[in-house]
Image: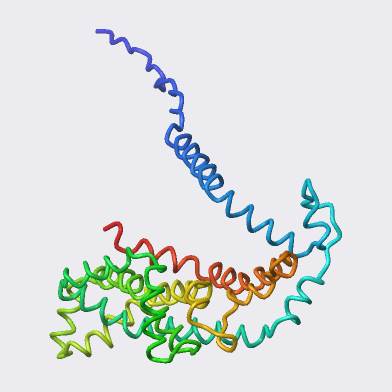
Amino acid sequence: MSQTLTPLRPPTTPAARPAPRPRRRRGSLLGRIGLAVAVTVALAPALFVFFWMLTSSFKQQVDIYTIPPTWFDFTPTLDNYREALTRTPFGRYMTNSLVVATCSSLLGLVIGVPAAYSIARYRQTKLSLSLLTARLLPGVAYLVPFFVAFTALRMVGTYPALILSHVIITFPLTVFIMVNFFAALPQEIYDAAEVDGCGKLETFARIAVPLTRPGMLTAGILAFIFSWNDFKMALILSDGDSRTLPVAVFNFVHEASLDWGPMMAYASIIMLPVFILTLAAQRHIVTGMTMGSVK
């Protein structure tokens, strides 16, 4: 009896399919490009003003009034900065701005952080609603009441008047930022602190505050920036001795003309500390402004 053997066929591998096109990657790339274009268009006016201010600060008066304007074809000079620093008591104005901005931001944190903790921890919706209403009011609405009150108290032209006015305006923003940070803390942290025997004040000081330091940094930076750039309150509530840097720009405004060169140099000097501070802490600022928006 014969047995026939069938030859074994080599295993055949299926034909490789073409790799699918990376549609998601293309979509995400197009989305990023579109977002970059939209952000550039939205920021173009502000960037143009910044560029115009910076270039004008290095121009001579003749080059500033040239039509059509020259953006690059001019001889840069530092005379505007020299005049801006020597024509006015820059050191005194800088000291005033630093004192008012630092004290108002710190005092705002001292008052705003406990208020935000109380709202987030004990669900005080009515207080939160009242602070939100105050946040919606424009700063110019406080000018007349502040001037009348501080005039009656004989505080116009003093540091406390400027500091208190800035604290009142930035207080709702500080509370709004810190409420989101305190609300993001899990309930288990408070329960564990209670089991360990911590009281309400000790839980706030030793548990909640250390965990929300990024929020405090964000709120403090934003309050400092507002106080540093404030013009309206400082114009109404200050005098020659307590004048801050934004108000000091008026020294270059005359009845018949404007000293554009020194004015642009002065504005560039005022903007430089805030610009550096924003770049150094931009990650904390973005985190603080978006905390609690997505859970």
* Residue 37 occupies quadrant: top right
Q: How many marks?
A: 0
* Residue 262 occupies quadrant: bottom right
Q: Nearer the viewer, residue 185 or 278?
A: 278
Q: Position of residue 52 (x, y in %)?
A: 69, 56
* Residue 85 occupies quadrant: bottom right
Image check: 256 left or right of 139? Answer: right
Q: Nearer the viewer, residue 233 or 8?
A: 233
Question: The N terminus is located in which quarter?
Answer: top left
- Residue at the (50%, 39%) spot, across then down: 34
Question: The C terminus is located in which quarter?
Answer: bottom left
Q: Nearer the viewer, residue 2 or 197?
A: 197
Outermost residue toward the top?
A: 1
Q: Position of residue 209 (x, y in %)?
A: 31, 82
Outermost residue toward the front?
A: 255
Q: Position of residue 14 (x, y in %)?
A: 40, 21
- Residue at the (15%, 71%) spot, across then down: 123
Image check: 172 left or right of 284? Answer: left
Colour mode of the rendering = rainbow
60 relative to 175, above or below: above
Q: Nearer the viewer, residue 274 or 93?
A: 93
- Residue at the (65%, 69%) spot, across then down: 267
- Residue at the (42%, 92%) spot, across then down: 154
